[in-house]
Amino acid sequence: MLAMHAPDGFLEPQVALVTALASAVVVAWCLRRAADELDDRRIPLAGLAAAFIFAAQMFNFPVASGTTGHLLGGALAAILLGPHVGTIVVTVVVVVQALLFADGGITALGYNVMNMAIVPAFAGWALFVLFRRVLPTNAAGVVGATGLAAGVSVVLASVAFSLQWLFGASAPVPFDTVFSAMVAVHALIGIGEGMLSAAVVAAVLAARPDLVRGAQDLTPAQLGDGDRVKARTFVIGALLVVVTFAAVVSQFAFDDPDGLERVAIDQGFIGSARDHAFGGSLFADYATRGIGNEQVSLAVAGLAGATVALLVGYGLASASRWPRTRPTG
Amino acid sequence: MAANPSDGLTVGAGHGRLHLDQLAVGAPSAVRRLPAAPKLAGLFAFVTVVAVTPRWAVGALVADAALVVALVVIARVPALVVLRRLVALAPFLAFALTLPLIGTGEQVDVGPVALSVDGLWAMWNLVAKATIGATAAIVLTATTPVPDIVRGLEDLRFPRVIVAIVAFMVRYLELVADQLGRTRLAMTARAHDPRWLWQIRPIASSVGSLFVRTYERGERVHLAMAARGFEATMPVTGWVTPIRRSDVVVALLPAVAASTFAITIVIGT
């Protein structure tokens, strides 16, 4: 959960600044893209949707005997409202939480908006579109794709955070450790997020299918024929999520050396490199992080970063292609 | 906060029950009288200066902390309120406490345990900056009614659409949260007591129906507003305090002081 609602000082100022600029640009672009959707009629609706996401985050669900988690809602917002409006709505939620509830730092807004709004919304949307291609074109397919996309989007948000940590760690914890811990924890959170988002979309589809942006291409007949497959798709979807996570985690997360060994390796290097770690330009940090197996760090970072970037990019691209009207019939 | 953590439906995320009108608690004070826009600008400037202050400038960060405590006193915000609202930081402060243990690099022996020197610095950095930043934000919300904050965002030229969405969000947040509370009560009254992840179907359905009900409320709200002549800009209601230059100067004082501390210490070493 550490990637979410990070406080002031959690990452170094240069990362805060760069992510703030990037987030501002993306949100401004979303505002522009959504200008025709956010006419005076839609503004109250977007405000209410923001209130809904905020409230939904307060709705704890059980994970295992006694422990609870709560929805994050980035991918869900994108699937219900479209990625542009979804990003704007979740951004508003994050900003209001920081301003009114001191939940997340004000100077941390750049990376908090990126990790909680932009990456989940656009990567979630991209995955949703991809999964919908392979799943049947009916309500069950939409529900299954929602579950998978929402679950994986949480993991991608944790990957995005780990990459920010690589460039702007505020503490001498190597990238590999942060990455494996974040991905492992968020894989678990993602399972809950995926199941909850899927079930929420199923409930909305049953009552007001026109409110699900990601299901706009479905005809009423296609919406109706999914009931029998639903439970099975749900289980298969959840299983797929677990398998995907297991694959991702085992690929990247557990190939770093044992913690004690790492300390021994690093001590010689970091003792002398300490000034850089704190004086820190971007590159000084970059060079001192996880020096024990820099190659692995860089390879993993590159791969993970490319995945996030590709998915966000695909989400942006597919969002602009998405049909605006539902075919009748 | 969670009254009964096992019922699976408690209000969490550190927000407690929502009463936005009770966020502003401060008695009349110099801070409370300031208009929202300069106060917001002052807050942004102050937390930015604190965030860029290097961690080894211990004196500057201590002075910033003293400054923010002074602000709490001047603003007459009860200390208990500040502490209660700082709860959102708890997981991060707990994480910060582990940094000396999990941090790499040069180790120093403190009693039986070896602590990382860099980890200790990182702990200090995170605890100081997170607490100072959050406390400053709490002073703002404790001395500024929520509608004024929204107005302040507008005065600071935040995008019109964003401000309008924020305005609608805070206007309906309590209603939506109450609706959620009623659903929760109804479910609990019907012996709904989930323990495991695979029992979340009813919760998810409630959240789904909450979305539908919220959205339909939005549609009704728009119709009602259109009937009253709404034309895409929020009307100005209530009494608007004009912003004077002296307000801006006063609001920026903490940021100026914090930069002075930081520059003095950095140049001094």
Image: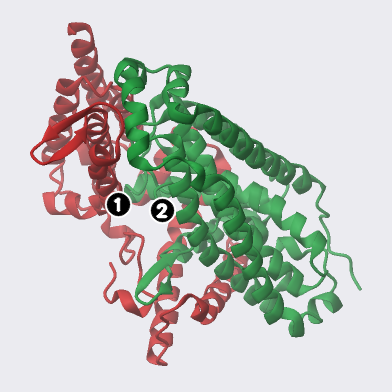
Residue A1 marker: 2
Q: Which chain is red?
A: B
Q: How many marks?
A: 2
Q: Position of residue A59 (x, y in %)?
A: 43, 69
**Mark 1 falls on what kind of element?**
helix
**Nearer-the-camera pick, A307 or B25:** A307
Residue A252 marker: none
Say above or below: B46 vs B223.
above
Q: Which chain is green?
A: A
Confirm whether residue B238 shows in the render.
Answer: no
In the drawing, does residue A116 fall left or right of residue B117? Answer: right
| Neighbour tally class for label 2: few under 14, some 14-19, many 20 plus, Cα within 10 Å | few
Say above or below: B3 vs A305.
below
In the drawing, does residue A316 fall left or right of residue A272? Answer: right
Q: Position of residue B54 (x, y in %)?
A: 28, 21
Say above or below: A88 vs B16.
above
Q: Quadrant of residue A302?
A: top right
Q: Are marks 2 and 1 in contact (CB under 8 Å)?
A: yes
Q: Quadrant of residue B159?
A: top right
Say above or below: B198 vs A184.
below
Q: Position of residue A149 (x, y in %)?
A: 65, 58
